Image: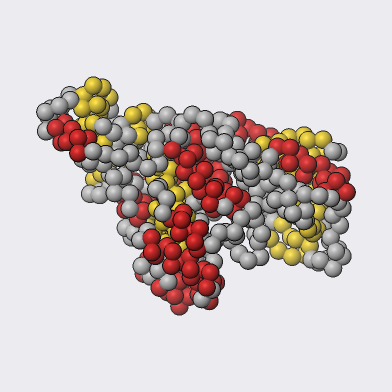
């Protein structure tokens, strides 16, 4: 399925009209469904007639014929689910593999924020993401990353300025400016940041926000800069404050941050101008818990009417992003819908994209560059931190860190440039629990360098070389040998393996690290 709609002719639409009038047979007829209509917040019995990939008619007992008929037998028919803010790269899957994981859970479209791959490859990463999306079986739209690097303290593989952002915004399938994380630059009048905001405004498209921790006058000032949304609210008070400021509320529930349970009171009272997003979600969690269907289960269990919950992943993300042909089951809209057993557990019977049973795409297009190059001098490197440097304190099941006294620590953390500059730095850590070996990864959200946690210099060097050979990924090295690995050859971030294979490899690396004493800190 293309991420951009194909060009239509008057003939295409005239045929749709003839089918709606009963003058011509349709392509697909879904008989006897309970249609979930998010715009009217109702559920009613109806048939759905499809022609040319779009809905032609919806109504009770349609006197219509089609080349193919599906008997719904009272199952619920909802619009296909839309994730309005997701980093596909965080799933560790390419778009086609990601589609294989989420289509069975009713997701038919996503708005990808390709911040990760653009930090590695620059605007070429956005081009690749859109191209890979076109062959994935999923509708993949995108927003243009606004903060590459995420801050002036980071050095990744690319720097993107306002002129490049403007070029990305002009590309078909790009729906707006991605989350403006540099809110200090917005509030402080940073010229480069405001040039990027200006490029977003000139495009006439959405300007996504990222206002973590902002409130009061600072939040109002951030909204006044022209931002349209925020996905960083963690309390009902923060959520309501954002809605009062005119921002759309993106309620985030993924692998790295889980805010839905806390914000359910707001969604029960104020379901408009809100949408559910996953932001970052890992492959193992997708397979174990589901995608947006999982969020719908939580909403309904928390007291939302099923049609209100469905609107949060269909009509409302479509409205926010200007996807005027998606998110509703109505004449003229794309025939993207999901057949559900019930409206409590949201068990998916079948997913349709463009009136066809959804199928993941074929081969992933090649991606030149973006691997791991540790540069000269790595084989002779040593990694003792300066004696006066503070120790990084880690906490189980947390992504936050603290500081411990210099000289303490149980493992060294090495961050190494992966773009051939031959630079690295190290510090002692306390709390990882790692008793031997080295865990290495080529993912460092957001700048994406190599991170190595371990003991001996020899194992640290061996883990770095293993990541080079793989083109990126996750490795566990003990006594110089690779014990477990998950190759991520697409920009050092993604694999095109089937989701179950990728999840199994990730599970093996995680289990092996646990055996060496590594404490859990969320999902890898």
Residue 283, given in percent of the width and then of the height, sits at: 56, 39
- Residue drawn at x 81%, y 66% as measured from the top left: 389
Quarter assignment of residue 225: bottom left
Residue 369, given in percent of the width and then of the height, sits at: 63, 43
Residue 366 seen anywhere in this rendered image of the structure? yes
Residue 98 seen anywhere in this rendered image of the structure? no
- Residue drawn at x 40%, y 68% as measured from the top left: 226
Query: Split into 4 quadrants, where in the image is the N terminus?
Result: top left
What sort of colour scheme is used for the picture?
secondary structure
Quarter assignment of residue 77: top left
Residue 264, given in percent of the width and then of the height, sits at: 41, 56
Residue 463, given in percent of the width and then of the height, sits at: 78, 42
Query: Split into 4 quadrants, where in the image is the C terminus?
Result: top right
Left or right relative to 238: residue 115: right
Relative vertical location of residue 396 with respect to residue 331 in this rendering, above or below:
below
In this view, the residue in front, 155 or 413, is 155
Relative vertical location of residue 414 with respect to residue 152 in this rendering, above or below:
above
- Residue drawn at x 74%, y 37% as measured from the top left: 469
Left or right relative to 340: residue 147: right
Residue farthest along the top direction in this orientation: 67
In this view, the residue in front, 213 or 120, is 120
């Amino acid at each position: 399925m293309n991420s951009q709609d194909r060009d239509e002719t008057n003939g295409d639409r005239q045929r749709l009209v003839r089918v709606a009038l009963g003058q011509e047979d349709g392509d697909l007829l879904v008989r006897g469904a309970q249609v979930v209509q998010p715009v009217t917040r109702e559920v009613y019995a109806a048939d759905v007639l499809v022609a040319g990939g779009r809905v032609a008619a919806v109504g009770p007992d349609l006197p219509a014929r089609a080349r193919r008929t599906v008997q719904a037998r009272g199952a619920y028919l909802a619009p296909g689910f839309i994730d309005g803010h997701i980093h596909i790269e965080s799933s560790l899957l390419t778009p086609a593999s990601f589609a294989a994981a989420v289509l069975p859970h009713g997701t038919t479209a996503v708005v990808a924020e390709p911040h990760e791959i653009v930090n590695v490859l620059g605007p070429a990463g956005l081009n690749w993401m859109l191209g890979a999306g076109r062959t994935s079986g999923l509708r993949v739209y995108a927003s243009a990353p606004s903060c590459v690097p995420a801050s002036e303290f980071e050095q990744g593989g690319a720097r993107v300025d306002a002129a490049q952002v403007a070029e990305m915004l002009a590309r078909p399938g790009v729906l707006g400016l991605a989350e403006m994380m540099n809110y200090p630059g917005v509030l402080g009048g940073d010229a480069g940041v405001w040039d990027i905001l200006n490029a977003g405004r000139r495009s006439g498209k959405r300007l996504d926000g990222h206002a973590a921790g902002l409130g009061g006058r600072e939040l109002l000032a951030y909204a006044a800069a022209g931002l349209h949304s925020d996905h960083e609210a963690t309390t009902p008070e923060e959520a309501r404050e954002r809605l009062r400021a005119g921002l759309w509320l993106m309620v985030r529930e993924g692998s790295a941050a889980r805010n839905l349970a806390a914000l359910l009171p707001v969604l029960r009272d104020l379901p408009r101008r809100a949408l559910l997003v996953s932001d970052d979600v890992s492959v193992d969690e997708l397979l174990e818990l589901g995608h947006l269907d999982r969020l719908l289960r939580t909403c309904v269990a928390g007291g939302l009417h099923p049609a209100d919950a469905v609107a949060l992943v269909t009509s409302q993300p479509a409205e926010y992003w200007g996807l005027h042909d998606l998110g509703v089951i109505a004449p003229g809209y794309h025939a993207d819908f999901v057949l559900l057993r019930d409206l409590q557990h949201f068990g998916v019977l079948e997913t349709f994209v463009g009136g066809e049973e959804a199928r993941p795409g074929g081969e992933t297009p090649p991606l030149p560059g973006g691997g791991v190059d540790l540069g000269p001098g790595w084989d002779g490197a040593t990694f003792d931190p300066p004696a006066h440097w503070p120790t990084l304190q880690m906490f189980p099941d947390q992504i936050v860190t603290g500081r411990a006294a210099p000289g303490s620590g149980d493992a060294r953390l090495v961050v190494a440039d992966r773009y051939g500059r031959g630079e690295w730095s190290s510090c002692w850590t306390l709390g990882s629990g790692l008793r031997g070996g080295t865990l290495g990864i080529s993912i460092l959200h957001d700048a994406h360098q190599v991170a190595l946690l371990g003991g001996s210099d020899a194992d640290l060097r061996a883990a770095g070389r293993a990541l080079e050979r793989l083109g990126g990924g996750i490795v566990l090295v003990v006594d110089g040998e690779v014990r477990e690995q998950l190759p991520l050859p697409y920009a050092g971030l993604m694999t095109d393996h089937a989701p179950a294979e990728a999840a199994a490899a990730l599970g093996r690396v995680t289990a092996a690290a646990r055996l060496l004493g590594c404490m859990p800190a969320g999902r890898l």
